[in-house]
Image (cartoon, rainbow, N blue to C red):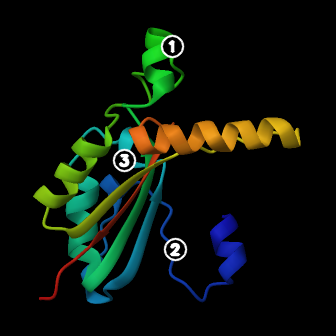
Amino acid sequence: RIAEESFGGSVPIHSERIESIEMDLTSIPYDLIVGIDVIEHLADPVLLPKKCFEWLKAEGTLFLQTPNAGSIRRYLQRESWEQLAPDEHLFIHTAQSLKRLLESTGFREVEVIPFSGSTTDSPARSVAMKSIGTLLRWMGMNNGLWASARKGKE
């Protein structure tokens, strides 16, 4: 809804379940497909990258955001980690597993970057959190993953 309001109909936006999309989206191939907090909810982990690969133009890009199974919080919180929600999050990836999945469905130039979305009100705490975030990113242990994958030339 927010995207539809923001772009005023100038950009095609599909907000239905990927499993139920019946129209042929290959007739108008896309330059970019964005999936924010989607892939972890699908019963078939290959469905999203496979469909997006079909729907993208040659050299089109898929951008995904998903929780990071390799995050420090996952290791520290163990079973109480909020992303472990079996009724909702059916598959949670590490950077390596997400990269392999995207490459196995035909994508090239796959880049997966760990990120943290934490914000703070305190300037001093903000500086400390940025330093910790940099260290966690270097270790690949931030809370989330951003992935971009490009479809090759046809």
- The CA distance from mark 2 to mark 1 is 36 Å
Q: Residue at x 72, y 36 (%)?
A: 128
**Count of numbered circles in the view:** 3
Q: Does residue 21 appear to the left or right of 134 in the view shown?
A: left
Q: Does residue 74 appear to the left or right of 152 in the view shown?
A: right
The earlier-in-sequence mark between 3 and 2 is 2
Residue located farthest toward the right when viewing the structure as drawn: 122
What crowding class fits label 2: few (fewer than 14 Cα within 10 Å), some (14-19), or many (20 or more)?
few
- The CA distance from mark 1 to mark 3 is 22 Å
Residue type of the residue flagged with mark 1: Gln
Q: Position of residue 92 (x, y in %)?
A: 35, 34
The earlier-in-sequence mark between 1 and 3 is 3
What crowding class fits label 3: few (fewer than 14 Cα within 10 Å), some (14-19), or many (20 or more)?
many
Q: Secondary structure at mark 3?
A: helix
Q: Residue at x 51, y 18 (%)?
A: 81
Q: On the image, numbered disc 2 is attached to which residue?
A: 13
The earlier-in-sequence mark between 2 and 1 is 2
Q: Secondary structure at mark 2?
A: loop
Q: Residue at x 43, y 44 (%)?
A: 138
Residue type of the residue flagged with mark 2: Ile
Q: On the image, numbered disc 1 is attached to which residue?
A: 77
Q: Does residue 5 appear to the left or right of 16 in the view shown?
A: right
What crowding class fits label 1: few (fewer than 14 Cα within 10 Å), some (14-19), or many (20 or more)?
few
Q: Position of residue 146 (x, y in %)?
A: 44, 55
Q: Quadrant of residue 56?
A: bottom left
Q: Is residue 134 visible?
A: yes
Q: What label does residue 39 carry, if any?
A: 3
